[in-house]
Image (cartoon, rainbow, N blue to C red):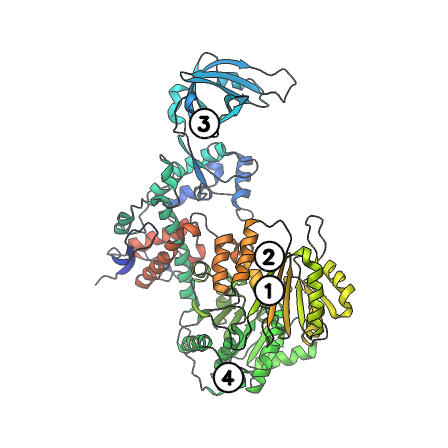
Amino acid sequence: MRETFDLAGRSPSPQGGGKRTPVRFSPTSKPSTPCRTPGRIVPRPSTLDPLFRSLHSLKGVGPHLSALLTRFFGAPDGQEAIALDVLMHMPSGVVDRRKMVGVANTWMGGTVTLKLHVDRHIVPPRGRKGIPHRVLAHDETGDIQLIFFRSEGGWIEKALPVGEERYVSGQIGFFNGEKQITHPDYIVEPDKFATLPLVEPVYPLTQGLSSKALTKVVRQVVETVPELDDWIPQATRDRFKWPSFREAMGKVHMPQEPEDGDLMGPARQRLAYDEYLAGQLTLQLVRSQLVAARGVSRAFTGEITSRIEAALPFSMTDGQRQAVADIREDLASSNRMSRLLQGDVGAGKTVVALMAMAALAESGAQSTLMAPTELLAAQHFRTLKPLADAAGLGIVLLTGKMPAAERRAALAGLASGATSIAVGTHALFQSGVEFADLGLTVVDEQHRFGVHQRLALSEKGRHTDLLVMTATPIPRTLVLTHFGDMAVSILREKPAGRQPIDTAVLPISEYGRVVSRLQARIAEGAQAFWVCPLVEESEHLSVVSAEDRFAELKKVFGDQVALIHGKLGAAAKQEIMTRFARNETKILVATTVIEVGVDVPNASIMIIEHAERFGLAQLHQLRGRVGRGSNRSACLLLYKDPLSETARARLDTIKSTEDGFVIAERDLELRGQGDILGTRQSGMPGYRLAVPDAHRHLLDWAHDDAKAALAGNPGLTGQDGEALRTLLYLFRKDTAIQLIRAG
């Protein structure tokens, strides 16, 4: 009986919706040679060689252009750009040159193609570079001038000989009431008209790279794209009228009609789906590696977790209880856990993590909680220690600056198994830190901890379960894109007792009134954060720095004001935070170093200066530092005029809602997927063919199809499996190819 799997087929819909109807897709009878054997990875198919060759091998690409393209496409250090880089560089639009209406029927700003008779040249006087070279020409409907600035070498006279006809294409302008084309895009002899691209793609460029040079390279590459066995079933391609990969690339890069490259056209949708499918296959293969059977099925007594819950000062929400249940089910399984815990600011993720670590302790194993900074690690430790102590659970904080004797004692407790939980930064996994039986790793702020780091944890031989937490609500699109290898739990409710936060937006010109009101609130016993975007004054930005604002507030509030920022040492930051937490200082002037994790329940006022310079996610995170106690809290967003349309939309969004998931979706609309999680800084994937705003519906399909493909054919064997491997090579998912198990 042959194996089969579903690659979901769908009914077309203008909005990209439609019911899912399975299309049965079965591997061809015999698999080809084994796709992976121990110690050997099948090499890239030779059919793809033309796309992996250096650009040096292409006609017209010399050392200068090759170096320019290598920088432009961001090739890894020591490597050159290859043909595939050019192929994956999508046009941003098209120029339609098909309008051949005659001079009389042209219009201002229109791009046209005219067949002109050249009448005469008016050459500027020698040395007068500001005067253009003008060419007078006409057709049967009227006269026009062709304008060239700084032209030398006589090439214009050669290109436009007096008395002859030429096809000229460019944008129509007017000067002194006369029609003209300044620097025409194309000048073509009548017998070479076929070489003039009537529908021309427009590409993003960089300084020194001309559109014509890039277009020549692109056309050469497109002509070498091989015919490939398709990884999408014929029935699905027929349903959506999707062309083959080769045909799709041809339509996008060498369009015959302006519609050929439309974002929602068949060619571009097919390519977007291909890119999504390659990404989702990669994440599913990573998941198969992370959750590979480890032979440890955890059993729980309930003793420690019940003591933890009894010690909580509040009742857990339904969302927290469900997340704990999901985690316990994962831990009881013989597969390794790989789970993402999403929770809005103040949703109680840390408590869920503690319940998971307590469950591990019941099974006799240890846990670690890794935070991105020592400040946040210390914050977690202070939150967890009283609860752990109440439950009789050994917990220790490991930092890089502990006294030697204290560190030795902490390490001894972990090595012997007497200590159940270690809290710290990534230094927890440095040499010298030994665990008796490490069973669970909890990572805070997941978006700084990508796929490669997740694999690295696995490859270090620490076959632990993995729970990762983020206080950044992530839209579903981005969850699938970056964390599709992980199961997901979401905490949407806030713990009982959390106060709503009153949010107001004011111009910075109201500074005096803000300080006066702040004086009154401080006198009543309140504490406040005052956040600025920069540590110190900048020559380039007209922005009030944290240091400047600290100095101004100190004139009014004296020693009640403290300053904290990222340039301070860990010990200094900790001391300042401790004094603020003890209510020894009343106002903490800060940069975004307090964005994540700082918990001071008595602080009920958040003032964000130059709020127009912060992203939506940052504003939401900063606001979440208040509203943690019993007092009604307020967030004040101070902005400097004039506001851009996007900045105003951000501030309006923050003012109108506290729902982090609504804010995250709005952030995605305003910024696009590339910046939301800092992917460009963290090395996480961006897209080259897919445009998330237009192609979002395709991501869900690709996610489901990747799961179905690997469920039915985990080794990607046979003709269909080989086609999917080719797809992975095309999108340079080398990590994924190495993870494919023998079928």
Q: Is residue 460 visible?
A: no
Q: Is residue 266 left or right of residue 689?
A: left
Q: Earlier in the sequence, mark 3 or mark 2?
A: 3
Q: Earlier in the sequence, mark 2 or mark 1?
A: 2
Q: Secondary structure at mark 1?
A: helix
Marks 2/4 in contact by CB < 8 Å: the verdict is: no
Which residue position holds label 3? 107
- Toward the viewer: 374 or 441? 374
Q: For the C terminus, give its image quadrant.
A: bottom left
**How busy is the neighbourhood of tag 2: few (under 14 within 10 Å), some, or many (20 plus)?**
some
Which residue position holds label 1? 622
Which residue position holds label 2? 614
x then y, percent, for residue 403: 70, 76
Q: Is residue 628 above or below residue 218?
A: below
Marks 3/2 in contact by CB < 8 Å: the verdict is: no
Q: CA distance from mark 2 to mark 1?
A: 10 Å
Q: Earlier in the sequence, mark 2 or mark 4?
A: 4
**Which one is in front in this view, the residue at disc 3 or the one at disc 1?**
3
Give the residue type at disc 3.
Trp
Q: Is residue 415 visible?
A: yes
Q: CA distance from mark 3 to mark 2?
A: 43 Å
**Which one is in front in this view, the residue at disc 3 or the one at disc 2?**
3
Q: Is residue 691 above or below residue 148?
A: below
Marks 2/1 in contact by CB < 8 Å: the verdict is: yes
| Residue at the (60%, 54%) spot, across then down | 612
Give the residue type at disc 1.
Leu
**How busy is the neighbourhood of tag 4: few (under 14 within 10 Å), some, or many (20 plus)?**
some
x then y, percent, for residue 536: 72, 56
Q: CA distance from mark 3 to mark 1?
A: 52 Å
Q: CA distance from mark 1 to mark 4?
A: 29 Å
x then y, percent, for residue 600: 63, 73
Q: Earlier in the sequence, mark 1 or mark 4?
A: 4
